[in-house]
Amino acid sequence: MAEIIQRDGTWAFDGTTVRITPGLHRSVPLFRQTYGEIAVPLEAVSGVVFEPERKRGRLRMRLREGADPLLQATGGRLPDAADPYRLVVDVDRAGVAEYVAEEIRRALLLDQIPKDPTKTYLLSGPPVPVSVRSSDGSVSFDGLQVRIDWADTSDRVKRATGPRIIAISDLVGVEWLPNSGYEDGFLRFVTRETAFSKLPPEKDPYALDLWGSARRDLLTALVATAVTARLPHPSTRTADDQASRFPQLPAAVPSQADHHDVLLRRLRELGELHREGVLTDEEFAMTKAVILRGF
């Protein structure tokens, strides 16, 4: 057993699995503490390196492309401190860190683990049900459907549509961008109908606009990962432009008539909200223009 215990967390390698446990110190980001322990099978690992520095070093693990739904969902956008595959190491433990890294590298070599992309997820992602409260509302996923309940501060267009429930069978992808504290982020659920008509996150009833606490909003990546783990693996993508943008989309490109039907339906829903007095004339005109630009 090769093991290193630090304030930032613990890595333990038994020859087949790297078990990563986040530390409990207040310096450890809320996201890592909430995501919890991660068991990384050796076949999911591409490489590991220890980066020594003057005061502290860092252990970093690289996973094979397509092995982890968390990396797939976040697309490398997790802040460095929230990355669970990174461990801050005190200078006096550098020798132990080097030993752990070398043991993992030796096992990769002996087991002849390939470095090419995987054809299935080798990590399971967070368990379900999972629920997160963000600046724009609450989002939950039970393994079968996503539910979004809007906050009082959400845009009127969103609140007027009521809670949004999306079956996993209707989803073709998830898009996630963290709230950096300087720029807003979003969590968007992409369906076959909305894939080609994107409203701004603040007005999109299929998206959470992340503008509040960056620390809290980062937890929406839990839902993004849980959903991603239950969508078709990215290895199923096709070569056309549509599949390059949304890996889980079917190869067939929707016809112009399909686009027209979606446009009419969106405009009809918008018109009903306007007639019922939910939207003002100005809000109706602005949202209508956004929808038309999306098509």
Image (tube, grey):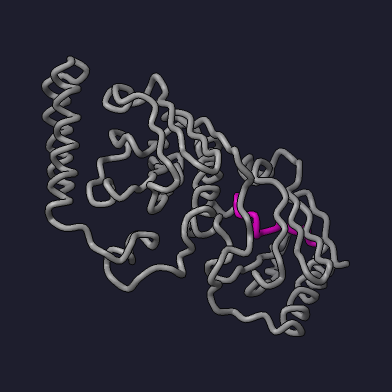
Residues 182 and 228: in front is 228
Magenta region: 82-91
Residues 146 and 215: in front is 146
Residue at point 61%, 69% (across, down): 62
Residue at point 71%, 63% (across, down): 57
Q: Is residue 151 above or below residue 114?
A: above
Q: Residue 100's x, y, as percent? A: 80, 69
Q: In this rendering, would 45 be left or right of 133?
A: right
Residue at point 65%, 41% (across, down): 34
Can residue 81 be seen here? The reply is: no
Quadrant assignment, res 219: top right
Q: How many marks?
A: 0
Q: Residue 157's x, y, as percent? A: 26, 26
Q: Is residue 141 above or below residue 271?
A: below
Quadrant assignment, res 237: bottom left
Q: Residue 217's x, y, as percent? A: 50, 37
Residues 263 and 85: in front is 263
Residue 224 is inside the magenta segment: no
Q: Is residue 209 above or below residue 88?
A: above
Q: In this rendering, would 39 be left or right of 46?
A: right
Q: Residue 289's x, y, as percent? A: 12, 37
Q: Quadrant of the N terminus?
A: bottom right
